[in-house]
Image (cartoon, coloured by chain):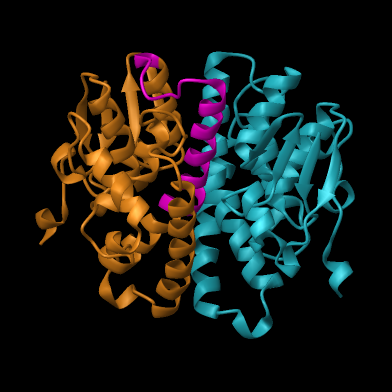
Chain colours: A cyan, B orange
Amino acid sequence: MILYCFGESGNAYKAALAMELAGCRWSPRFVDFFNGETRSPAYRKLNVMGEVPVLVDGDLTLSQSGAILLHVAERTGRFGGASEAERREVMRWILFDNHKLSGQAGALRFVMNFLAPEKRNAEVISYLHGRVQAALGILEAGLDGRDWLAGGAGPTIADFAACSYLFYPEPFGFDRQARPRTDAWLARIERLPGWKHPYHLMPGNPSDRA
Amino acid sequence: MILYCFGESGNAYKAALAMELAGCRWSPRFVDFFNGETRSPAYRKLNVMGEVPVLVDGDLTLSQSGAILLHVAERTGRFGGASEAERREVMRWILFDNHKLSGQAGALRFVMNFLAPEKRNAEVISYLHGRVQAALGILEAGLDGRDWLAGGAGPTIADFAACSYLFYPEPFGFDRQARPRTDAWLARIERLPGWKHPYHLMPGNPSDRA
């Protein structure tokens, strides 16, 4: 399996982490996002949505991290949830993550760290900061009495989705110490056999552009 | 089936429209979002994510419009996609919609129309406007050579997700005439037997607060 990805992409990390922890054989294909590759006609032909990640698995080409996570879970029989109820919770948290957590945290991290300094707008940062804090509060509430987001005995692809941006060092208003349940949950993920930090799992990181 | 909803919620409309077109028997339960009901402890007990819609179907309580759409498709055998490939496309477009289309359009429509005028920030509106236009461009590209988003012979829950905010009259930078494929696709949806406008399908609309 080949994953189109780059180190800074939390959305790509979700897919890479799930494949790595499920023991898949996969290779990264570096996408030069910061030089505009995802805007190129060739990339848009691969993925009309113009996003990373894209998974190529034999004849199948699949984008959207959530769809890739479901494919990896189905293909490997791992991390998809142990019951119908748990699988519903997996879907709910993947969707929540896409919309409210990674969707906003990824945008805020980009604006605060990767956008050209003269384009960083304090009002936009303040707006996104409020959205990210609200989502982090819901994540913390969702972990009340649960070790894993979908409520089962082990991790699922919902955990791999929601954790993704929270491992990055670039600031976007996430203070791990201020969110004790989230902190303990991230520590549980870090202890899973085979866990790797995004900058160790995928090619490319900010020091390449320093 | 009971759907916790209110007329202005495009996310609730996705679920309501799918149930209506699938011929489900369902009743709306009005949520007084504009007076803070979704922030109340009772509502957070119903849905830790604090969002509309929530579906109650017998013993099942389910939030997240995408998860509800999948449940309705499974329960009724309608609109879920006719093949494995089509079902993958359904997932991809529901996820894209949540993250990039409805996720941003819903936020922009809220800021431009429902937020107190003194809180409407031109920089935030400009930022969200750019995000919404990019997503609308991808929707238009995704409809190239397709009548329906998932690429099959008929509509799916992916269409009901992605169309939802595009039927509302409040401005958020969507010009139907400027997006000819999107315009034709919305007209196809409007012609589906049983289609109703969000303000005719769910209780509550802006004139209630005028």
Q: Which residues are magenta?
A: B75-103
Dividing the image into 4 quarters, which one contains the C terminus of chain B? bottom left
Residue B25 belongs to magenta span: no
Residue B95 belongs to magenta span: yes
Total number of numbered labels?
0
Return the x and y of residue A57 as percentages of the image width and height: 75, 31
- Drawn side of residue A199 relative to residue B119, left or right: right
Reply above or below: A156 against A140: above
User: Residue, x 16% and y 56% (percent of image)?
Assistant: B206
Return the x and y of residue A182 as percentages of the image width and height: 67, 44
Return the x and y of residue B182 as percentages of the image width and height: 35, 51
Q: Quadrant of residue B159?
A: top left
User: Residue, x 37% and y 55% (percent of image)?
Assistant: B106
- Farthest residue, direction front: B145
Q: Quadrant of residue A32?
A: bottom right
Reply above or below: A73 against A41: above
